[in-house]
Structure formats: structure tokens, C-alpha cells
Image (spheres, rainbow, N blue to C red):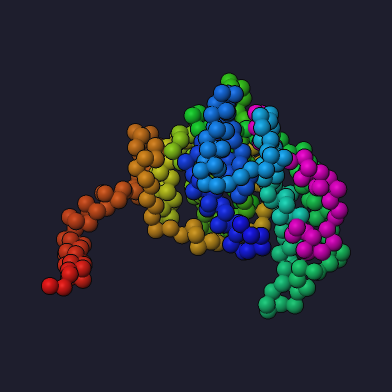
Amino acid sequence: MPYGLCNAPGTFQRLMERIFGDQRFHSLLLYLDDVVVFSSTFKQHLERLESVFSRLREHGLKLKLKKCHFFQPEVKFLGHVVSASGVSTDPDKISAVRDWSTPSTVAELRSFLGFASYYRRFVQGFARYAAPLHKLVAKLQPHPNRNRMGRNATLRDHWDWGCDQAFNTLRDKLISAPVLGYADFSKPFVLEVDASGLGLGAVLSQEQDGGPRRPVAYASRGLRPTERNMDNYSAMKLELLQLKWAVTDKFRDYLLGTKFTVLTDNNPLCYLRTAKLGAVEQRWAAQLALFDFTIEYRPGVCNKNADALSRLPAPPVPVSMDEITSGIFVPAEIKSVVVSPSVEIQAIDACPTRTRANLQLLQAEDPVLKAFLALRGCRRCRYHTPAG
């Protein structure tokens, strides 16, 4: 693969996924030419290595021995250290943060925020510490109708005590980032959620090896301008928004197909079954119907993790068109669809989802759609009938 081509990384990644697609996330991790083979026993590791070597040999790919490391207790992968104890930040990468000087231009500040955001899952309350810095970048960013200096603007006249405190605190938090646990999909997850007038917060954790719950990831974001309007967003609606965001957007890959428990300090959210929902809430409930979970009430004094994240002032989040969806179809093999629904799943069927087969059956029984489908079928037959 020649270097310098703009489509070279994507092409090579597709090649590697074609070779190891069935083994990815099952016995190995894959990113371009970095392949991490993992296993739980020595014998299993030998078998998986032999399988990898066989695939490479079959497709004519070669390995450079000096770049290979075998039987390592921990490895560095994409800026992270992966070991038996969990996932942590790469000390070599974080050492650069320790000596990072105070940014003097917008470009330098953006560079720091981009680096820090890559490790935001390790920092509880990342949105709080980064909020003054994001606000400063938004203030100095170029605008077509305004006279602003842009990315090369100096920060000397705008850098205040709050920005300096945020920069130093965020840097210290990255240096002392905790080790996050691995997600064990054979065990249930616990999702702690909370919302406030400042933002949304969530903590995904799991009980492992009989010990206390261990955090798997942190998440938080600020409210959009429309979400800050308390006339349109009641406390119940804001908590439901937080639940929808955490489950369907932030931790979807973790939670889809597994059973989990939601802990909230909003008692009305536990009665979602009998609540009278508006059109927006029904749409959110329909998206949540794909997941298998139960909701438990926990007082706010005991919900400190998510509560602290939700009260962190963060920059407003712009509206994305990707969030406007008309419907979601899930393969039948997803476990959360075929398992017996829990009470909470039945509780949010005010706007139920239907499978593709159900929709086709209902369309065939509808008198209007039935005539339309018959007309479309006749046209297809006419267009595809071979000439005699």
C-alpha cells in the first residue's frame, strides 16, 4: 500500500476487516496494521495466534518480527494501555500533558482540547473543566459577518483566572486518570443518570469479581438552547431526555442486547408506564423500547456520580440532523428484542415499535395501502416482463 494517498487508510482498513472480520472483537482488536490478539489462557492464545498467522499467510501479508510483541501482560493500543486490570491512559501520551504550557493562541487551545477530549471517558466531570475553554474558543472563532481574529488570535487579552484554573485542573485530572474496568457482557450493567438545568450526566458501571461497582465510562454534555427553556422541558421530561441520550446515544453499543438497571433520583421516571406522554416523549419512549432495563429510584444524596456530572456547566450542544430519525429496525437476533419484555419495557409501549414483518402484514391488510401495493406490483411486472 503506497503512502500519501488520501484513501490508503480506508482501503487498508477494509482489507484487514475482510481478512479478520469474523475474529474482530472476539479474539482480536484491529486498527490498520495494529493487531492485538487477546485470550484468557496460554493454550487459547497459541490457537488464536496460529489462526492469525494462517490468515495472513493465506492473503499474502507479512509481519516484521521486531515490531511484534508476544505474550505481554499489557500492551499499548491507540493511546491506551490495555492490561488485565483494565484500560488506562498511555503514560507516554499523558507525559506530554504534564509539560503542556499555557496556550497562547486559539489554535494551541484547540489542540489541547482535542487531545484532552480523546481521554474524556476517563475524567469524571470533563464538561465542567472544559466549559470555560470551549466558551473562549467559541468567542474567538471566526464568523463571516463579524470581525474576529480567528484561529491565530492571541489569548493574552482574553485569558482570565477562570480559564487558567480550568486548564490546570483539566491537566491534573488527565495526569491522574483512573483505570476503567472492562465491560463484561455476561453480567448486567448499572447506569446512573441525572439531569439538571445545566446539563446531562451518566455513569456506566458494573459489578465484577464480587467487588464494588467499577466504572466503565463517564459521559456528560451541556443542554441545547431549546432544552434550557423550562417552559417546554419539565423535570420529568428533562430526566427522560437524559435517559434517552445515555441509553440510545452514548452507551448504545454497551447496552443494546444486554439487561441493565437504571438508577435515577427522579421518582416520576419510575412510573413511565402510567405517565401521560406527549408526542416528543412518546418518540423517546419508542427508541428506549429496544432496550431491556428496569428503573430504580435512588435519592439524590446517593446519586452523587451522575448528579455531579449533570450540574457541570458545559457549552451548548448544536442540533444534529442525525438525531432526527423516523424509525429503527433491529435484526431479529438481537437479544433485547426476543427476550421476554420486563415491566419497564411494557411501560413505554405508548408508541410501540414493530418489526418489518408486522409492518408488511399491516400494510397488506390496509385497504388503501393494499391497492397501492397491488398497483406497484403490476407496474413492476410490466417493466420486468421480457419482450415476446
Q: Is residue 218 visible?
A: yes
Q: Nearer the viewer, residue 38 or 272?
A: 38
Q: Residue 242 magenta-drawn?
A: no
Q: Is residue 210 above or below residue 143?
A: above
Residue 21 vertical placement versus 326 (above, below): above
For the point 58% across and 40% down, the residue is: 29
Res 299 seen here: no
Looking at the rendered image, the quarter that the C terminus falls into is bottom left
Q: Position of residue 311 (x, y in %)?
A: 65, 46
Which is more toward the observer, 225 or 328?
Answer: 328
Q: Is residue 93 rendered magenta in the image?
A: yes
Q: Using residue 362 as the reference point, say whether residue 70 is left or right of it.
A: right
Read off the magenta span.
83-111
Residue 289 at what x, y percent from top left? 40, 44
Q: Is residue 271 left or right of residue 178?
A: left
Residue appearing at x 76%, y 74% in the figure = 148
Query: Closer to the camera, 19 or 306?
Result: 19
Return the x and y of residue 261 as percentages of the image width and height.
49, 33
Residue 25 vertical position relative to residue 197 in the rendered view, above or below: above
